[in-house]
Image (spheres, coloured by chain):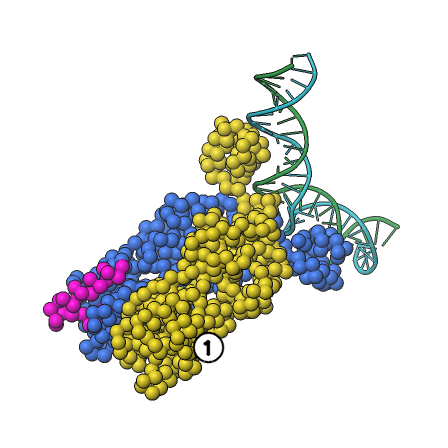
Chain colours: A blue, B yellow, C cyan, D green
DNA sequence: CGCTGTATCCAAAACGTTTGCAGTCGGTTT
DNA sequence: AAACCGACTGCAAACGTTTTGGATACAGCG
């Protein structure tokens, strides 16, 4: 395997010159550089990542370290997320390390190990919980990180995050349903152990208020875990007096919406936007939201933009360490704090509502 | 940040002893070891990954390097795959690097760079094409790798792979349909640019032959790309004379099956196992196969077993470099060659067939 | 008392880079 | 003529480990 020595020898220069030539320093003769570059190519030379990160203090690697098994609810979305993140990393010329740990204890240990072994320059967090202890841990450890999602008490703490405005998305959804004539809108939510579930629910509530509707406790179901529970909840809904049946069901995620979808179809109810049909909506715009019939009306999380923003922020953090961050304005993007960005999602109207 | 020197100093021993104590060598006093371990803990010491892999020749990292954008067809499955792979890596105590490249040219460069920079000990390939040039490249480069999937001419070449027996899966599916009374079984396939599509198709053909059925060219559609094409193909199927309508449609993947599902529902046709309904089957058992109504009958790719096997094989390859590989027998697992393993998939019967 | 064996420990080399500092060599300024 | 400058180039240190090949001390043995 070729090292910098081989290149230096063959080019008849010192390793210093090879290094400088390859790294684009200005103090090397243009002819020399060309020769070095050519020979490096011939020899198939690539600098050793290990040596490089040992010497310089950078690994050019970031790690995506989700809590797996935390909530099955969010799994399908995070698989999508990884894909988008990998692509964004490629664009930023970064390597992406993916780690998972089973238990919270493992997670703590994992993060410490990651930081301690200097395996990565920064961490991307996801699946943030309402009062997520990992954030404090990472701040103590002193490793650059950006979270995808907020704790609910983000007012107190300042830590960098990017989030999609779940409340705004839900409001848009409710507004859409209201325009379509719906007045009895049910809400199904997954567990409140992730913060986005809370934000989305509060968006639903705000949406109702904005249109003068009142929340009907019998039509709001929380902490839904699996399909059986969802099916039972749907059954309860339609066991209400006929004139109190909801005409639309808003679900806190696409996965849950698909469960609702299934339950309605299994119950022989028709889904859609026409009168007499039940409207169903989701959140996330997973690829499979378009695969059911009728297609699921939902809110698209701007995955590519989210990942790009996450990385932008993280890269800045890594570079500046603790210097202040420049805040530039951009459309579709709100700065909540110095390192806190909110992205607005987009309504995707299909046939289910 | 604590280094081995700090630990050594505080423990009053040399760095050699610290290293050996922490790595479980036998020639260090048990008392000393305990003290070292304790102090390492206090100091939050973790060995530098860079230094370690610079010195020892191992990174304890493997890289998953799929060809992205090659075929959208296979995307959803590979997102699932990453998740399973990450978990398997965690179990093997390996780090997982995920890289993607857009173009084949980038891919070549990416692989060379990966090997040249010694960033990882081995590579996991996926999405193997019928005549995949990457395999030759990797053999030239001389980096341990295992492919998930086969080239179609795997007879000639010997390279390590793990694959799920698509042909066997399809045969099981056809047999199941035959038992259910189906005699006119259509086949829809995605592009033949991936080898598994070929294997699955040949399994379908074998399945027909085994039951004395003959392939009807009008009922076999290849190279289906998007939903519009699928919808058109379904329409053509049911434009045939009534008594020549297929009673079942076998799709080469779940994704495609869901398109068929959608097309049938949109055409007002009923899907299911009862007489008069159209049966639909898929392949992969994506999570969403269970989310449509009726649930999709399909063939489950044993994802966890696949990833575990891939890693087992790769780890052996890394350790032995070029020594012969021990071949141990196990249920549900066939050795095609010295480093070539075939896993048998499992039929998952739901309500769509 | 010297020799061998065992249990423990350590110094130093090596891994492949990047970079601070110092050198060389023409040409230009004072 | 001396001093200086700019453009290049090279030496050697440093990054944090693991490992090789001893050292040291102490016990048992003849």
Vertical order, B65 against D27 (above or below) = below
Vertical order, B181 against D25 (above or below) = below
For the residue pair B251 and B120, the one nearer the viewer reads as B251
Q: Decide whether residue B287 is among the magenta residues.
A: no
Q: Is residue A206 left or right of residue B326?
A: left
Residue displayed at 30% across by 74% down: B181
Q: Report the residue that reaches farthest toward the left.
A: A241
| Residue A350 visible in rendering | no
Vertical order, B31 against A294 (above or below) = above
Residue displayed at 36% across by 83% down: B237
Instruction: Using a 10 Å C-alpha cutoff, classify the residue at mark 1 as few (fewer than 14 neighbours), some (14 to 19) or many (20 or more).
Output: some
**Chain letter belonging to callout 1:** B
For the magenta stretch, what is the residue range? Answer: A226-249
All told, the count of numbered labels is: 1
Q: Decide whether residue A245 is among the magenta residues.
A: yes
Residue at numbered disc 1: B223
Where residue A312 sits: x, y (%)?
A: 48, 60
| Residue B189 visible in rendering | yes
Residue displayed at 34% across by 53% down: A70
Where residue D29 sits: x, y (%)?
A: 61, 16
């Amino acid at each position: 395997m070729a090292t910098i020595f081989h290149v230096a020898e063959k080019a008849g220069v010192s390793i210093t010159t090879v290094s400088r030539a390859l790294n684009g320093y200005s103090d090397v003769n243009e002819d020399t550089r060309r020769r070095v570059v050519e020979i490096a190519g011939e020899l198939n030379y690539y600098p050793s990542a290990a040596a490089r990160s040992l010497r310089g203090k950078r690994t050019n690697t970031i790690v995506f370290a989700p809590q797996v098994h935390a909530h099955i609810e969010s799994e399908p979305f995070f698989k999508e997320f990884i894909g988008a993140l990998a692509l964004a990393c490629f664009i930023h010329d970064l390597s992406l390390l993916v780690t998972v740990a089973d238990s919270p204890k493992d997670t703590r240990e994992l993060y410490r190990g990651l930081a301690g072994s200097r395996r990565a320059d920064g961490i991307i967090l996801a699946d943030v919980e309402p009062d997520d202890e990992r954030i404090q841990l990472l701040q103590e450890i002193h490793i650059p990180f950006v979270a995808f999602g907020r704790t609910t008490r983000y007012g107190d703490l300042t830590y960098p995050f990017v989030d999609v405005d779940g409340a705004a998305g839900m409001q848009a959804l409710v507004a859409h349903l209201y325009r379509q004539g719906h007045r009895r809108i049910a809400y199904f939510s997954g567990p409140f152990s992730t913060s986005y579930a809370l934000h989305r629910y509060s968006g639903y509530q705000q949406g109702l208020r904005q249109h003068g509707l009142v929340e009907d406790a019998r039509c709001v179901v929380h902490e839904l875990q699996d399909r059986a529970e969802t099916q039972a909840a749907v059954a309860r809904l339609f066991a209400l007096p006929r004139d109190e049946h909801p005409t639309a069901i808003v679900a806190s995620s696409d996965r849950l919406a698909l469960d609702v979808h299934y339950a309605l179809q299994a119950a022989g109810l028709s889904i859609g936007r026409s009168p007499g049909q039940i409207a169903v909506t989701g959140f996330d715009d997973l690829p499979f939201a378009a695969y059911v019939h009728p297609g699921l009306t939902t809110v698209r999380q701007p995955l590519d933009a989210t990942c790009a923003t996450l990385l932008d922020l993280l890269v800045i953090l890594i570079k500046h360490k603790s210097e202040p961050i420049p805040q530039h304005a951009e459309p579709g993007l709100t700065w909540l704090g110095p390192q806190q960005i909110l992205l607005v999602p987009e309504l995707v109207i299909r046939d289910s509502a």
